[in-house]
Amino acid sequence: MTDEIPRGLPAPPPLGAAALPPGTYAGQVVLVTGGGTGLGKAIAAEFARLGADLVIAGRRCEQLKTAQEELAAVPGAGRVTAAVCDIRDPERVAEVFDAAGAALGLPDVLVNNAAANFPSPAEDLSPNAWRAVVDITLTGTWFVTREFGRRHLAAGTPGSIVNIGASYAWTGGPGFAHSAAAKAGVKNLVETLAVEWGPYGIQINGLVPGLFPHADMTEDIRGGLEHAAPDSKDARQPALRVGAPRELGWAATFLASPYARFVTGHTLVVDGANWQRRSLVNPEVVPVRTQLGRGPFIP
């Protein structure tokens, strides 16, 4: 008998495959915040592939223009528009919904992907640094969600919301106190609003990505990955591989689809079980300051 060789989870279907029937989102308008780059753009692409009309929102005009062209070229895509928007500004958020409504119609689906993050020991976070992350990740998400909900409530129409979360909303996130606190709030919004707005036909779910490397990762995150695992990212995942961005897009299109109407108030983790990984023996504790290469704290 030979020793079993771990092979991990199989690779996903190729880029261009669809998880739902063609045209599932034909005639539907999908708004994706942070849709001009990274995972937001990957999620938007899968909605486009299923026939959706897209509104992508973000803070950088040039990135949005490039993404708009790329998404419009996706086979099966409907119309694609872009809107420059800082989601911390509720008046600008309302203007984006006005413009989307005039061009395409009231969004049927909202994907709250926009967020901010950077690693830091908690004691080093300035008030402005804390506000920068919490105001985008939590308060901005609330402003967009509120606008979506109020408009559907007023119109008497159903809708679907997907909030992009993080696994440290459950566990805490040493080195990311600001983001972990904000993402815990985002998760709680999912659970609260599912009950409040369910009677009116509005469903809301969360979606937590694991490690999905992509070209738009920040230097902080990319540098941390290279420092921790320059040649062994796959071996550090129970799946023995990292995720493909399209896999997150497939999960998002399902959660917002007609096939998941009875799924609401749920947060789905798509990370190959990495967040549930535990060692038989706990590794030695290394303080966050040491992990980040910071010297002793000096007030």
Image (spheres, rainbow, N blue to C red):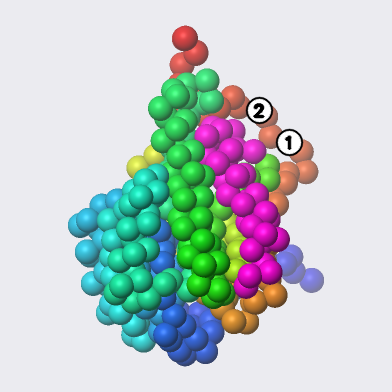
How far, Cα to Cα, is label 2 from label 1? Answer: 8 Å
Q: Amino acid at mark 1?
A: Asn
Check disc 1 and report its element: helix, strand or loop: loop
Taking the spot 67% from the left edge, 67% from the top edge, the residue there is 198
Q: Which mark is residue 285?
A: 2
Q: Amino acid at mark 2?
A: Val
Question: x%, y% of residue 2?
Answer: 74, 69
Residue in front for this viewpoint, 150 or 44: 150
Question: x%, y% of residue 153?
Answer: 55, 67
Residue 116 in sight in this render: yes
Q: Magenta residues?
A: 172-201
Vertically, is 16 above or below 145?
below
176 part of magenta stretch: yes
**Label 1: how many Cα within 10 Å (few below 14, some 14–19, many 20+):** few
Q: Is residue 225 left or right of residue 75?
A: right
Residue 240 in sight in this render: no
